Amino acid sequence: MKAVVFDWAGTMVDYGCFAPLAVFLQVFKNRGIELTAEEAREPMGMLKRDHIQALCRMERVAAQWQEKYGRIPDEADVDALYADFEPMLMETLHQYATPVPGAIQLAERLRGQGIKIGSTTGYTREMMEIVTASAKQQGYAPDVLVTPSEMPAGRPYPWMCYRNAMLLGVYPMSEIVKVGDTTSDMQEGRNAGMWTVGVLKGGSELGLSQDEVASMAADELDARLAKASERLLVAGAHYVIEEIGRLDEVLAKINMRQSAGERP
């Protein structure tokens, strides 16, 4: 493998992907619509306006909106919700850029092997200016960042990954690995023709804080890990790892398969 393209929140920073969660819940609550955390997380990884649009299209959410406003939410409602969402998120983003355990060390190991590091995100360029500045101060900075702001569309389309390949000067796509924590990450990687790896602990699909992971009964944690793993595999993951620091093991397996003539 010549390069790895990482997601940001829930993969390399912001353990549990909590930055956008509370804001999604609040902007809908302000309009009298109650979301569950599971609902709010389901489209995670998408461009945030697309995320809000996906939430509005959920049957239960649309039914609440219909009951309260006498109609289903339209594009003007999506725009209004996003107009509330963006400034609320921007106020708190700097608090959610701490690298997850093992992320900095992994980046160092990859660079030591001559592997380049790219990144994609569901955040806009303006949002990522806050996240990247804070993450860099704490020791994590990929070689390349591409956001949906520069592309015709965000995930699950492959455009951000293609742009990463161009900026990194790496091809073919089968020699680049996509790593993320959401189903849209998996779809993005597969749509780009890349080996695609899902990560569980620290990710949005699992949706647990470090303290929750540490204190949860082993059988319950195993059940939640299995459920999250299944969602990522169904979305297209070639591999699912428990934590980001174990990516090296999967890269070795991918290299062996690639050497044997397999392609993603």
Image (cartoon, rainbow, N blue to C red):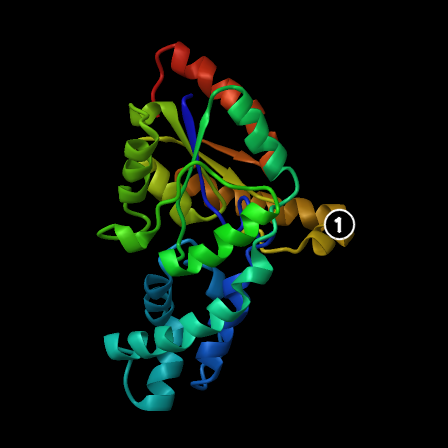
Element marked by disc 1: helix
Q: Look at the image and tell me whether residue 124 can be seen.
A: no
Estimate the x, y position of residue 211 in percent, counting from the top left. Answer: 73, 55
Which image quarter: residue 262? top left
Relative vertical location of residue 112 with respect to residue 107 in this rendering, above or below: above
Relative vertical location of residue 247 with respect to residue 214 in this rendering, above or below: above
Q: Residue at x 30, y 55 (%)?
A: 149
Estimate the x, y position of residue 99 in percent, counting from the top left. Answer: 60, 46
What quarter of the picture does the C terminus occupy? top left
Q: Residues within 10 Å of mark 1 (few under 14, many from 20)?
A: few
What quarter of the picture does the N terminus occupy? top left
Which image quarter: residue 27? bottom left
Which image quarter: residue 120? top left
Estimate the x, y position of residue 197 in percent, counting from the top left. Answer: 47, 35
Q: Relative to the observer, which residue lies in front, 118 or 80?
A: 118
Residue kind at label 1, given as amino acid type: Ala
Judge from the rendering whether residue 58 lies leftward or rightward of residue 25; answer left or right: left
Q: Residue at x 67, y 44 (%)?
A: 222
Give the residue number, with chain letter if any, for mark 1.
214
Relative vertical location of residue 151 with respect to residue 252 in this rendering, above or below: below
Estimate the x, y position of residue 164 in percent, counting from the top left. Answer: 33, 37
Q: Residue at x 42, y 48 (%)?
A: 183
